[in-house]
């Protein structure tokens, strides 16, 4: 098994693959916390207008943090996609209120997540319960993202995950909702491509955006992997002899190239794009995006695994 972070050496990359890499990177969506969004001087200096920016609902977070972050994104010409954590919603009235406030400022798309909590605050134990409430359809939220798990789930098994995706697909068909999938991040290209093939019969018309960890140092990446339940790939990474010593920093170049080759080999793939988790900071991910869009930049400028760059927010 080849780890995605291993850089390809030797043969020159096919120009068509390079073009697909640039397309994937330049059209990437990204995640940013409310604090990052509200504290940065100018988002448009980092990302182009029209970028989809997902706003996570962090553990112990408040909806009152999500709303101004979405407003800031709209003001700067970005498209906010706030997370809606099912287990943290206390009641139908609260859900109706949150959705109403988001609609009022112009938000029209959501990312549904179960929520990073073992306890359930109200009547919504999972994202299916949010859909079954009917409130999303009533509030005209007809652009909805859901999660995919190429690297498995700490609690739900493969059959349960497949059944949940099927039910969400059926909901989208019945309600006329535009559904898409954003996956967790992983470290093995084969884990992504194998998962894409496995869900092909379940999601024949649903675009998939593969979650990719942005540039960061290896220690930070492993910590996030453990926190996010990305267990299998992370354990493989640690078992690889010498990897912790040799790999001082991470960039997703090798992984994105592998995804581009998959898209080139399978034109009908569900793979529609990539979604960046900027664990090394927004500025560092923005710099990586710009550098990948400049094909003539030498590797020393583009960065690699042994080219540590200090993290920044």
Image (spheres, helix red, strand yellow):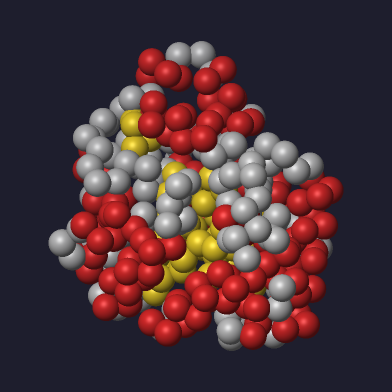
Location of residue 110 with respect to 8 vertically, above or below: below
Q: Residue at x 72, y 39 (%)?
A: 155
Q: Let me know if residue 139 appears in the view.
A: yes
Residue 257 position (above or below residue 4)? below
What residue appears at the point 53 percent right and 31 percent down from the top-left corner?
226
Which corner quadrant holds the N terminus? Answer: top right
As rendered, which of 174 and 253 lies closer to the eye?
A: 174
Q: Is residue 294 visible?
A: no
Total marks in image: 0
Q: Nearer the viewer, residue 82 or 260?
A: 82
Residue 82 vs residue 296: left or right? right
Residue furthest out toward the left = 41
Q: Is residue 4 left or right of residue 36?
A: right
Residue 37 in the image: x percent, y percent? 28, 60
Percent of width and height locating residue 264: 57, 60
Identified at 24% across, 46% down, the residue is 313
For image coordinates 38% across by 82% down, the residue present is 105
Q: Is residue 91 left or right of residue 45?
A: right
Q: Position of residue 248 (x, y in %)?
A: 33, 25
Q: Position of residue 230 (x, y in %)?
A: 58, 37
Quarter of the figure with residue 220: top left
Image vertical order of residue 114 relative to residue 134, above or below: above
């Amino acid at each position: 098994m080849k780890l995605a972070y291993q850089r390809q050496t030797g043969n020159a990359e096919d120009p068509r693959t390079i073009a697909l890499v640039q397309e994937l990177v330049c059209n990437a969506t990204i995640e940013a916390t409310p604090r990052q969004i509200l504290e940065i001087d100018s988002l448009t200096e980092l990302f182009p207008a029209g970028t989809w920016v997902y706003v996570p609902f962090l553990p112990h977070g408040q909806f009152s943090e999500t709303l101004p972050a979405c407003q800031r994104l709209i003001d700067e010409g970005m498209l906010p996609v706030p997370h809606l954590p099912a287990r943290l919603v206390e009641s139908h009235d609260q859900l109706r209120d949150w959705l109403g406030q988001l609609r009022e400022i112009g938000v029209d798309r959501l990312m549904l997540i179960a929520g990073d909590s073992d306890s359930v605050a109200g009547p919504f134990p999972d994202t299916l319960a949010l859909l079954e409430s009917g409130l999303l359809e009533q509030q005209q939220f007809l652009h909805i993202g859901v999660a995919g798990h190429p690297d498995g789930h700490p609690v739900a098994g493969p059959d349960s995950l497949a059944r949940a995706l099927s039910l969400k697909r059926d909901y989208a068909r019945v309600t006329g909702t535009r559904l898409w999938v954003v996956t967790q991040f992983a470290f093995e290209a084969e884990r992504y491509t194998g998962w894409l093939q496995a869900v092909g019969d379940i999601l024949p018309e649903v675009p998939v955006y593969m979650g990719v960890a942005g540039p960061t140092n290896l220690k930070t990446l492993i910590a996030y992997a453990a926190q996010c339940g990305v267990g299998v790939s992370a354990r493989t990474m640690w078992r690889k002899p010498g990897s912790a010593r040799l790999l001082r920093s991470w960039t997703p170049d090798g992984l994105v190239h592998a995804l581009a080759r998959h898209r080139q080999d399978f034109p009908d793939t569900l793979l529609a794009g990539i979604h960046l988790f900027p664990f090394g900071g927004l500025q560092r991910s923005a710099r990586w995006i710009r550098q990948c869009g400049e094909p003539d930049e030498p590797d020393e400028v583009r960065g690699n695994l042994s080219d540590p760059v200090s993290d920044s927010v």
